[in-house]
Image (cartoon, rainbow, N blue to C red):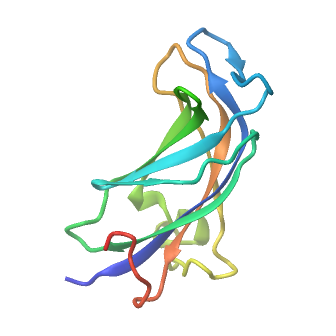
């Protein structure tokens, strides 16, 4: 069964705000008015965590993971949750679920009769995803920028 080497980049986020449990209430819980955001990505049964970027609502992570995928290990979704790190726990900032079949549509991929791109191809476009809430009582704000692409076979997988 052929194996594909695939890279996911969690590039940056913007306009993050803490989701309060009250309708229409968005606020920043840190006394400084900022958050200490980080993202947790789940692919299949693996979890990957970006570094925490302190005192910002617009973090630049530039974090990548490399995966080996084949038909038996191809995830249906990529799930990413953004959190605000606090001294005693964390606050939820939002999440996204991305169907794996939609990853290359922006590059003239399969849905448009084109080819999926190499991760470092200058024509490979970053994609912004709006954060979603997990309950009706929450409000979330912000977007996360991701990049997806194939990499050379000799790249070491983060799964090994």
**Residue drawn at 58 percent across, 63 percent down:** 63
Residue 126 is situated, as x and y percent measured from the top left of the image, at 65, 63
User: Is residue 26 visible from the viewing direction of this image?
Assistant: yes
Q: Is residue 113 above or below residue 132?
A: below
**Residue drawn at 69 percent across, 19 percent down:** 26
Q: What quarter of the picture does the C terminus occupy? A: bottom left
Residue 139 is situated, as x and y percent measured from the top left of the image, at 61, 21
**Residue drawn at 26 percent across, 74 percent down:** 70
In the displayed structure image, the side of residue 144 where residue 157 appears, left or right: left
When asked about the image quadrant of residue 146, the answer is: bottom right
Residue 87 is situated, as x and y percent measured from the top left of the image, at 58, 29
User: Is residue 113 visible from the viewing direction of this image?
Assistant: no
**Residue drawn at 67 percent across, 12 percent down:** 24
Q: Is residue 62 above or below residue 136?
A: below
Q: What quarter of the picture does the N terminus occupy? A: bottom left
In front: 11, or 114? 11
When asked about the image quadrant of residue 157, the answer is: bottom left
Residue 105 is situated, as x and y percent measured from the top left of the image, at 53, 64
Q: Is residue 50 above or below residue 90?
A: below
In the displayed structure image, the side of residue 37 where residue 98 appears, left or right: left
Q: Is residue 39 above or below residue 60?
A: above
């Amino acid at each position: 069964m052929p194996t594909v080497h695939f890279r996911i980049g969690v590039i940056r986020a913007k306009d993050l705000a803490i989701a309060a449990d009250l309708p229409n209430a968005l606020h920043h819980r840190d006394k400084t008015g900022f958050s200490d955001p980080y993202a947790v990505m789940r692919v299949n049964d693996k979890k990957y965590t970006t570094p925490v970027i302190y005192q910002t609502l617009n973090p630049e992570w530039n974090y990548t993971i490399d995966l080996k995928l084949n038909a038996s290990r191809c995830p249906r979704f990529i799930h990413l949750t953004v959190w605000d790190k606090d001294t005693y726990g964390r606050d939820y900032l939002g999440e996204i679920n991305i169907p794996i079949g939609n990853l290359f549509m922006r590059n003239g991929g399969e849905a448009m009769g084109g080819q999926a791109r190499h991760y470092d191809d200058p024509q490979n476009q970053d994609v912004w995803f709006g954060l979603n809430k997990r309950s009706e009582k929450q409000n979330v704000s912000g977007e996360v920028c991701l990049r997806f692409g194939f990499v050379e076979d000799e790249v070491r997988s983060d799964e090994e």
